[in-house]
Amino acid sequence: MEKSIERCLSETCSMDGVIGSVLADQQGLCLGVKGKASISSSGVITAIADQVAKLEPASKNPIIVLENDTNQCLIQRADRATVAIFKTSNPVN
Amino acid sequence: MGCCWGSCKEDSASQGGDTNERTHLLVDPVSNNTPAQRANSDDFISRYPNSIPKKTDEQSALSRILQETATNVIDVAALDSHNLEQHEYKERSKQYQQRLLMQGSSQRWHLSAPSLLIDIPMPEKVLAAPPLSYADMDMISLLVQNANFALEELKVEHREDLVVPFRIP
């Protein structure tokens, strides 16, 4: 049954520019990692998503972008899962 | 009651002039001497004219007190405004900077770990950067939806009995 989760992560990692992806549950437990990403980052990612979601509780789940000169980290959460995608910054940016 | 009676007796004894063990050897100096001094103050001035401080003496004494006070008081504001000229400020700042440089090599603040929060040279460039592209937003939204859907479907398939009876004979 966890193959669908792995398939989601694999499909995402196969996209252009994506380095790695992390999937965590509501409590921050790491449910899956693909590519160049750390298992231990799942708790921090979930915490960030939870805190940012408190800024505007009425709106839907926000997309958080952490970036440096070369890479981006996109975080979004849903009811049961929190997902982070690590990717290279677009050359346009 | 006994105290009241004792004091009354004492007063009557002292007023009567009889000396016993309760009469004061030293009479009250305030009640006895003050009217006498007041009455005799004019006589005292006329009798000892040299010992009385005259007005000039008073002024000189006042000025002496003022001088002593002035020598004892350290006026910080006056010191700053008088003594420090502009070039002295510069000299002192140079001196302090040299001493800081001498001390700086050994006691400079060292960060234990490199901080992630570092000033960037041109913040307006970063702030003016275009926001997240729609493709990236779609990508992560799709991944979140799929992962959420996959987690909802996640079920535990148990193939063995959860409770295992021990075969105790």
Image: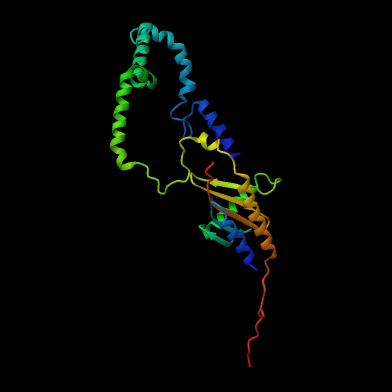
Q: Quadrant of residue B65?
A: top left
Classify residue A51 as left or right of residue B64.
right
- Height in image: A39 above or below B54? below
Say which quarter of the image contains residue A81: bottom right
Of the 4 image quadrants, the one containing the C terminus of chain A is top right
Mark yes or no: residue B65 visible.
Answer: yes
Which residue is the extreme one toward the bottom?
B169
Measuring from the top left, give residue B16's x and y in whole percent: 52, 26
Depth check: give the residue in front, A66 or A27.
Answer: A66
Q: How many marks?
A: 0
Residue A42 placement (x, y as % from top left):
56, 57
Q: Is residue A45 above or below residue B89?
A: below
Residue displayed at 54% across by 29% down: B11
Up-down: is B74 above or below B100?
above
Report the front residue among B18 and A53: A53
Kindly tell me whether residue A28 is visible in this rendering.
no
Q: Nearer the viewer, residue B82 or B23?
A: B82
Quarter occupied by the N terminus of chain A: bottom right
Measuring from the top left, give residue B20's x and y in whole percent.
47, 33
**Rendered residue at 34%/15% (across/down):** B67
A32 or B15, which is in the foreground? Answer: A32
Answer left or right for B70 relative to B23. left
Please provide percent x and percent y for residue B78. Answer: 37, 18
Which residue sits furthest right? A58
* Model colouring: rainbow
